[in-house]
Image (cartoon, helix red, strand yellow):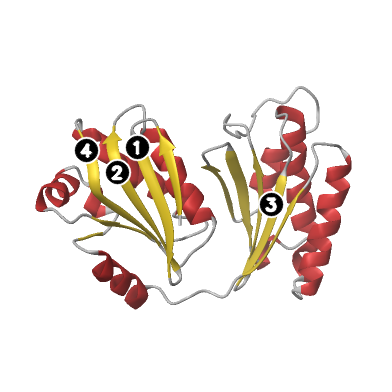
Amino acid sequence: MTSEHSGTLTVIAETLGHDTLLTVAGELDSSTYRGLRDRIVKAALEEPAAVIVDVSGLEVAAESAWAVFTSARWHVTRWPEVPLVLVCRHVQGRSALQRNGVTRYVPVFSGIEEAVAAVAAEQPLKHRRRAKEELPAERISLCSAREMVEQWLTAWSREELIPVAKIVVTAFVENVLQHTRSAPSVRLEASGETVTVAVGDENRAPAVVREHSDGPRPSGLKIVASLCRMWGVAPTPTGKTVWAVLGPENRL
């Protein structure tokens, strides 16, 4: 169990079987909105079976702040596809969530046991292979990232995606080295027919495709966008994680 404080908000994280439970208490307002969203996204990126958020202890002055949960869901719905559900033990909170449209996208339950049972019934556990490595903020990390990707995918018998995965990880790591001062964190995941390449950094600036680069060579993210099934950016409390999903159609 871990406890984190952000202004007037407290988030306690604990493991419930294959799920992660976040118990949130305090004031949800404009000063704590982003921190809570990013903490939920961070929990999802660790890929439990589901993220369950107990909001019974939240104080919400402006009801528009409830949208933090639909925002968090939007950031994780494509990858890592971890379900997000809410628990609120009092009818006032559940009514506010419904009134503000949150329940159209994020299920809400009156108790933790009910939420856990619902998740177990709806979401069979996925078998995923994962590997992760922290690299230094140096140019040598470009070569190291490519070597690791090749080793991991070879070990997982996914050699057909090695060429495109190496291009993607190079673009992501190069983006970190060029535009931030942080060390890249490389992560690879294989699930079913897909492989996901993800690189995290400690810079909050969003990763964007630049339509007009300074030179004749297209930007790295523009190359990634043309090579993968889908890609995106997940904010975290300390920065962001940029990811790309590769399928059989992306083989080179």
Are discs 3 and 1 less than 8 Å apart at CB? no
Going from N to C along the chain, the mark reached first, 4 or 1, is 1
Q: Nearer the viewer, residue 145 or 34?
A: 34
The residue identified by callout 2 is 25
Are discs 1 and 2 less than 8 Å apart at CB? yes
Distance in Å between CA atoms under marks 3 and 1 = 41 Å
In front: mark 3 or mark 4?
4
Residue at horizontal 65 percent and vertical 63 percent from the top: 189
Distance in Å between CA atoms under marks 4 and 2 = 8 Å
Query: Dot 2, crowdedness within 10 Å: few (<14), some or many (≥20)?
Result: some
The residue identified by callout 3 is 227
Going from N to C along the chain, the mark reached first, 1 or 2, is 1
The residue identified by callout 4 is 59
Distance in Å between CA atoms under marks 4 and 1 = 9 Å
Distance in Å between CA atoms under marks 1 and 2 = 6 Å
Q: Point out residue 124 in the picture as x, y percentages from the top left corner.
A: 43, 77
Going from N to C along the chain, the mark reached first, 3 or 4, is 4
Are discs 3 and 4 less than 8 Å apart at CB? no
Going from N to C along the chain, the mark reached first, 3 or 1, is 1
Going from N to C along the chain, the mark reached first, 4 or 2, is 2
The residue identified by callout 1 is 9
Q: Point out residue 120 in the picture as x, y percentages from the top left corner.
A: 36, 75
Residue at horizontal 50 percent and vertical 49 percent from the top: 42
Q: Secondary structure at mark 3?
A: helix
Q: Nearer the viewer, residue 169 or 44?
A: 44
| 136 left or right of 47 in image | right
Distance in Å between CA atoms under marks 2 and 3 = 43 Å
Q: Which disc number belongs to residue 141?
A: none
Going from N to C along the chain, the mark reached first, 2 or 3, is 2
Q: Secondary structure at mark 2?
A: strand
Q: Secondary structure at mark 4?
A: strand
Q: Amino acid at mark 2?
A: Ala
